[in-house]
Amino acid sequence: MKKALVVEDSQTDLQILSSCLGQEGYDVVKATNHQEALSLVKQQPFNVIVLDIVLPDRSGFELCRELKAEEETRQVPIVIYSTKNSDLDKFWGMKQGADAYLAKPIDTDELTRTLQQVVK
């Protein structure tokens, strides 16, 4: 089974994303902050990471950059999912290594299409 890590501090968004990913056949693991996400990534492999930018301990941009710098996680697709949806935010997210950038609120059809494009 495919495995997805969702890094999101909003319980509502976490539930919506988890439900959508579950319907797409993903086993979903949840993290609510940067540190928890890093710990989980070191423990198990993921097919995709869905990442919020605004996290309580550090920026999701930082986490994206860290994950793309590591040999073990470099190839894992990262989909940024954020309320920060200006062109500059999207540009910056892609510069940090994100494979896709989606704006909140979630459009489940768009998420599904994005997953099909980025997950091999």
Image (cartoon, helix red, strand yellow):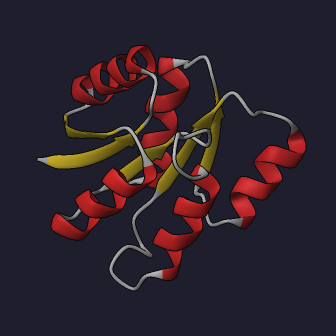
Identified at 11% across, 47% down, the residue is 1
Front in this rendered view, residue 21 or 10? 10
* Quadrant that contains the C terminus: bottom left
- Seen as rendered, the residue at the extreme left is 1
Identified at 32% across, 52% down, the residue is 36
Front in this rendered view, residue 49 or 108? 49
Q: Quadrant of residue 87?
A: top right
> In the displayed structure, would residue 19 be above or below residue 50?
above
- Image x and y of residue 9, in percent: 45, 31
- Seen as rendered, the residue at the extreme bottom is 71
Q: Quadrant of residue 99?
A: bottom right
Front in this rendered view, residue 38 or 113? 38
Q: Quadrant of residue 32?
A: top left
Horizontal side, residue 95 vs residue 111: left or right: right
One can see residue 120 in this view: no
Horizontal side, residue 37 vs residue 50: left or right: left
Identified at 45% across, 20% down, the residue is 13
Identified at 49% across, 48% down, the residue is 117
Horizontal side, residue 86 vs residue 37: left or right: right
- Image x and y of residue 24, in percent: 27, 30
Front in this rendered view, residue 87 or 66? 66
